[in-house]
Image (spheres, coloured by chain):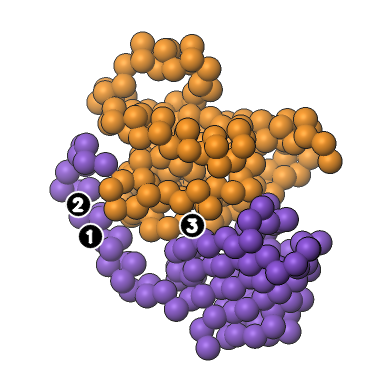
Chain colours: A orange, B purple
Amino acid sequence: MLGAFAVGKTSLVQRYVNSIFSEKYQTTIGVKIDQRKVEVNGREVNMILWDIHGEDEFQKIKSSYLMGASGYFIVIDGTRKNTLEVGKKIQEMASDATQNAPWIALINKSDLKKEWELTQSEIKQLSENGWHIIETSAKEDYRVEEAFDEIARKMLGQQGKNPA
Amino acid sequence: MESLYIRGTNKGEILVILGDPVKFFGRELKKGDLLEYLPPFAALFPLSRKNIFLPNIQTETGIWVNIYLEHYASHIFALMIDNTKNALELKKKSQERNQEYLNNPKSNDI
């Protein structure tokens, strides 16, 4: 889970792993690791989720956290346009560190869509540039399960392409 | 002693050789344990560098640990889990950041 601070990375993981959501904001310091077993295409997969602190002027993401990652999410807060710019920079770094592992951009907080600074035309532009985007809400449990299932499918697909 | 020192092979066996017990990703690790698998780090092996430092990893019990992985020789590595990190200091830092965010959730200062 990668992105600027307070975009909802931890909330998405908590929704996915524990089916809970808390309004109380709690900054992640360092990395919190969770896991959940999922079935993808009839195969049981143990997903190890590294919830990495949001990047800001206090905490820069270490590339060593990304080594060995099979895939990642770039999480963006639709209500804060600047989180897209942060997400773009992190994605470039993650692409290098993971040797082009599969990824998906999650535009989170769809429950606050009236307050979004990101416009549909900007989102469309990102899609046209090849971004796989899923709009999510950890609060309302909107498309969270789908997002994790999709990244799992992409990761397994990538593995199938690599020699054993 | 507040650290665990572990060595093993990248074939999946990890032997805890010294240190105080610590609960770590669903396992109570203690001296003499032979683990088949430590999931969070499985993807890191074989190591692509001689040393990897992973600071501030929060375990399920809420404590933070620093993790060092060191490549000794072909197929042999050491893993050290250091929980001497001052968890209270990190909690304080986290609380300060929470307050900053609550004061100005739309801040562009990132």
- How far apart marks 1 and 3 lie (CA) works out to 19 Å
The extreme left residue here reads B103
Image position of B77 (left or right of B51):
right
Q: Nearer the viewer, residue A54 or A15?
A: A54
Q: Residue at x 53, y 22 (%)?
A: A132
Task: Kindly identify which residue carries mark 2.
Answer: B100
Q: Is label 2 on the same chain as label 3?
A: no
Asked whether the beta carbons under mark 1 and mark 2 sit within 8 Å of each other, the answer is yes
**Mark 1 neighbour density, 10 Å: few (under 14) some (14–19) many (20 or more):** few
Image position of B78 (left or right of A133):
right
Q: Where does residue A53 sit, x and y in percent of width and height? A: 40, 51
The reply to whether residue A86 is visible in this rendering is yes
Task: Kindly identify which residue carries mark 3.
Answer: A32
Q: Is residue B104 above or below residue B79?
A: above
Identified by mark 3, the residue type is Lys
Count of numbered labels shown in the rendering: 3
At mark 3, the secondary structure is: strand
Image position of B13 (left or right of A86):
right
**Mark 3 neighbour density, 10 Å: few (under 14) some (14–19) many (20 or more):** many
At mark 2, the secondary structure is: helix
Identified by mark 2, the residue type is Glu
The reply to whether residue B44 is visible in this rendering is no
Task: Kindly identify which residue carries mark 1.
Answer: B96
Q: Nearer the viewer, residue B60 or A98?
A: A98
Q: Residue at x 71, y 74 (%)?
A: B7
Identified by mark 1, the residue type is Glu
